């Protein structure tokens, strides 16, 4: 078995066990394989092992990979920060966007989404740990932004996404995810038909699933360690 196939199996098993602990159905959590910095062949191996959804953070790299893999039926998610001058290619080449954190970006994506395509699925990124360096809307501004994004044409608001401050302590890991879950429940109670909590990465899959993640974004645990130099070059 290849290393990527083994990494996928291991990640799926971690999700399954966490679901069991939480009393959740395993099918209630989807796995997004984060393939940034890895070549098209790595995506091919993951696809052969049954993986369908892939996340990318760097636009040029993602578009090149999509071209190379055009023979496969894959679902592409843009999970990186969104620059306003990149909204058109993102709206044209992805099924999902996870990092929307202001109305202007959402409007540009809505304007650029081609009419012939399905609506672009959108998650609003929440700065749940309140870190200066992180992207994301403040928790107390999330609901009003969600309502505005939900009203835009050619977009479908699916839910919220976060990248919390990292911690090695499983209990600490759960706290920001729990706050995300509360925001999610509030938004649903306010009538927003959202269904997605995009949270949890290689180091905190379990904590995220225990607190209600519906989509975990996993890179390192599937593909191995990323080349740092490559990652810092957009
Ligand atoms: C890179 C990245 C991931 C994957 O992180 P790992 O720790 O390698 O699993 C998940 N989400 C986002 C937004 C990322 O940029």
Image (cartoon, helix red, strand yellow):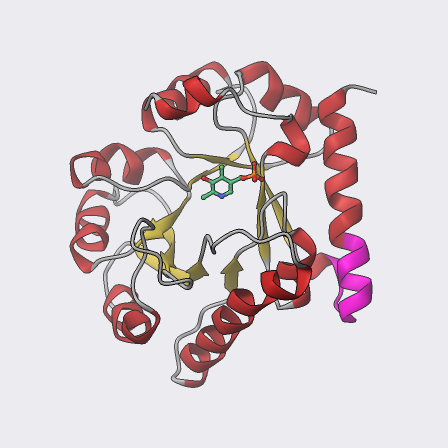
Asked whether 3 or 67 is in front, the reply is 3
Asked whether 158 or 33 is in front, the reply is 33
Residue 60 shown in magenta: no
Seen in the picture, residue 57 relative to 109 is either above or below; the reply is above
Is residue 177 in view from this perspective? yes
Residue 131, position as x, y percentages in the image: 35, 57
Residue 179, position as x, y percentages in the image: 49, 73
Residue 226, position as x, y percentages in the image: 54, 24
Considering every residue shown, the one lying at the far bottom of the view is: 189
Residue visible at 71% across and 25% down in the picture: 4
Please, what is the dominant secondary structure of the magenta stretch?
helix
Question: For this view, does 111 lie left or right of residue 8?
Answer: left
Residue visible at 18% across and 54% down in the picture: 107
Seen in the picture, residue 143 relative to 199 is either above or below; the reply is below
Asked whether 82 or 202 is in front, the reply is 202
The boundaries of the magenta stretch are 16-26
Residue visible at 20% across and 42% down in the picture: 112
Residue 25 shown in magenta: yes
Screen quadrant of the N terminus? top right
Is residue 119 in view from this perspective? no
Residue visible at 67% across and 27% down in the picture: 46
Q: Tell how many labels.
A: 0
Residue 188, position as x, y percentages in the image: 45, 79
Question: For this view, does 233 lie left or right of residue 173?
Answer: left
Screen quadrant of the C terminus? top left
């Amino acid at each position: 078995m290849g290393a990527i196939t083994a990494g996928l199996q291991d990640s799926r098993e971690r999700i399954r066990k966490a679901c069991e602990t939480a009393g959740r159905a395993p099918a209630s959590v989807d796995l997004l394989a984060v393939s940034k910095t890895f070549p098209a062949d790595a995506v091919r191996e993951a696809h052969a092992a049954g993986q369908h959804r892939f996340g990318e953070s760097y636009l040029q790299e993602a578009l090149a990979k999509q071209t190379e893999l055009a023979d496969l039926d894959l679902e592409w998610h843009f999970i990186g920060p969104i620059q306003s001058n990149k909204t058109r290619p993102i709206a044209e080449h992805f099924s999902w966007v996870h990092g929307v954190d202001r109305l202007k970006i959402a409007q540009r994506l809505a304007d650029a989404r081609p009419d012939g395509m399905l609506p672009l699925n959108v998650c609003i990124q929440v700065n749940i740990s309140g870190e200066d360096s992180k992207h994301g809307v403040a928790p107390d501004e999330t609901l009003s932004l969600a309502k505005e994004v939900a009203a835009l044409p050619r977009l479908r608001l699916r839910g919220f996404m976060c990248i919390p401050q990292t911690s090695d302590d499983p209990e600490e890991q759960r706290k920001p995810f729990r706050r995300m879950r509360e925001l999610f429940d509030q938004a649903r109670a306010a009538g927003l038909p959202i269904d997605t909590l995009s949270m949890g990465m290689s180091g905190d899959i379990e904590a995220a699933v225990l607190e209600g993640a519906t989509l975990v974004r996993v890179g390192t645990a599937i593909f191995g360690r990323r080349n740092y130099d490559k990652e810092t070059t957009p």
